[in-house]
Amino acid sequence: MKKVGVNVLLPVLRDKQLFIIVTSIFFVALFGGMFISPVDNDTTELIAPNSLWDLIQNNIMAMLLIASGIFTFGISTFILLPLNGLIVGTAIRNQYYQGIEIGDILLKLLPHGTFEIPALIISGVIGLKSVKWVINSFKTFNIRNSILEEVRQLIFLLLMMIAFLIIGAVIEWYIT
């Protein structure tokens, strides 16, 4: 009998290096954004969705743009992923400079960020998969089985990303 938990995590475990790379890129950019000199602007006017559906659509579009690196051999992912990290870091910094305490900032960010940040990381992994495929094609002679397995993993990661985004959006809209 197969263990369910292991089966769910299998795509993640197979792409462990990509997850480490993407997570590192995002958090380095996030911390970089926190230390950029403060800007005198109000970030609350940047994106103000009118409904939960608008929020979900906006988040899915952002993640799909990051994941589009699958078609550009990671180029768009390497541009948009750190840009998103910088935006989050800058937003945290701006809130802090507006006098909001770190605890309050985290209280607003963590409930929905717990789902949105993993979704963002998954979209980055998807965006870098084509680079992995090219590298692996030189290592293996059984390309057909390799491609089928990668497509299965890709579909799983997309579904996981969308589920995280929807949960995060619901929490952001109704709670934070």
Image (cartoon, grey):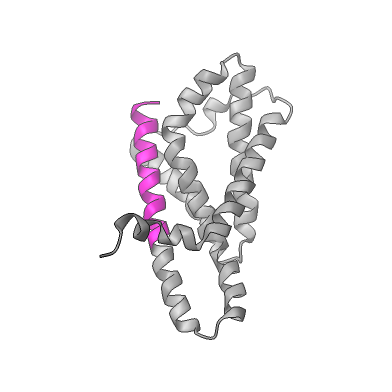
Classify 104 as above or below 142.
above
The quadrant in which residue 156 appears is bottom left
- Which corner quadrant holds the N terminus? bottom left
Residue 51: percent from the left, percent from the top?
Answer: 35, 34
Residue 134 found in image quarter: bottom right
Q: Main secondary structure of the magenta part?
A: helix
Query: Is residue 21 in view from this perspective?
Result: yes
Of 151 and 80, nearer the camera is: 151
Image coordinates of residue 154 in percent, x first then y, are 43, 64
What residue do we see at 53% from left, 58% from top?
16
In this picture, residue 115 sits left or right of residue 53: right
Residue sticking out furthest to the bottom: 141
Q: Which of the pair 83/47 is nearer the observer?
A: 83
Above or below: residue 60 compared with residue 39: below
Q: How many marks?
A: 0
Q: Residue at x 52, y 22 (%)?
A: 105
Q: Tell me the quarter of the picture where residue 11 sits.
A: bottom left
Is residue 66 a member of the stretch shown in magenta? no
Q: Which residues are magenta?
A: 156-176
Specify whether 100 is left or right of 6: right
Quarter of the image for the C terminus: give it: top left
Most extreme residue toward the front is 1
Q: Is residue 165 toward the left or the right of residue 2 in the image?
A: right
Q: Position of residue 53 (x, y in %)?
A: 34, 41
The reply to whether the magenta stretch includes residue 158 is: yes
Q: Residue furthest left?
A: 1
- On screen, residue 19 above or below 130: above
Q: Residue at coordinates 42% horizontally, 40% vertically from top-left? A: 115
Q: Residue furthest right?
A: 37
**Is residue 51 in view?**
no
